[in-house]
Image (cartoon, rainbow, N blue to C red):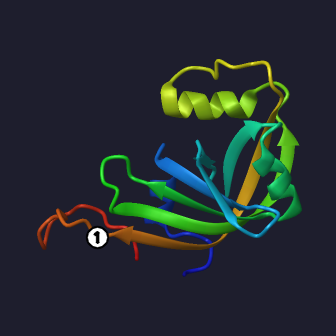
Amino acid sequence: MPAAPVPPAVDTFLRQPNTCVIATIRPDGSPHTTATWYDWDGSRILVNLDEVRPRLSWMRRDGRVALTMVDPENFYRHISVMGRVVEIVADEQRVDIDRLSMRYVGKPYPRRKLPRVSIWIEIERWHGWDRSPNEPAEGTTRERLPV
């Protein structure tokens, strides 16, 4: 797996509102995965969750995480990253969850009662895959992810 930083094609891919699954580590060492919204600022990944979620305590205990971002139109095209939580901050004004909601659904996040927390993740390693069985013929110009 290549180390960070990511090349331009991967950066471009991560800036899209792709389908994303995040994996965290439970106290017993087993993995836990869940679908999530994310954003990429060019150096770190942002995720946001209710403060009451068990995975928040798991990330505080062990900041190792993995995320897979999948092209919603072609699941053969995806990027998986392994990284570490580097910052956990309260999202009291709902700035980050509204940012994610606008990115994915085009309107502010509707549920406003539970406290929210923003998680910032730095990528340590990544892997890309772009080998669709329906990939373009040789000589076409579709940008490929470096794999």
Give me the residue at 84% from left, 49% from top: 88
Q: Position of residue 5 (x, y in %)?
A: 61, 71
Residue farthest to the front? 28
Q: Is residue 97 left or right of residue 134?
A: right
**What amino acid type should be assigned to the residue bearing mark 1?**
Arg
Please tell me which residue lies in front, 73 or 41: 73
Kind of element beneath mark 1: loop
User: Residue 77 location, x and y as percent?
Assistant: 35, 61
Q: How many labels sit on residues? A: 1
| Residue at figure coordinates x 69%, y 67% from the top left | 83
Vertical placement of residue 54 versus 92, above or below: below
Residue 97 sits above or below residue 59 on the image: above
In this orientation, which residue lies closer to the viewer: 59 or 73?
A: 59
Work out which quarter of the rendered image holds the C terminus and state it. Answer: bottom left
User: Disc 1 designates what residue?
Assistant: 131
Decide if residue 33 is on the left or right side of residue 136: right
Residue at 39% of width from left, 70% of height from top? 129
Q: Residues within 10 Å of mark 1 (few under 14, many from 20)?
A: some
Taking depth in this image into account, of 133 and 146 the one nearest to the observer is 133
Residue 118 place in picture, x, y as percent: 77, 42
Q: Is residue 30 visible?
A: yes
Residue drawn at x 19%, y 65% is 135
Name the residue nearer the viewer: 54 or 117. 54
Left or right: 80 in relation to 108:
left
Residue 15 can be seen in this image: no
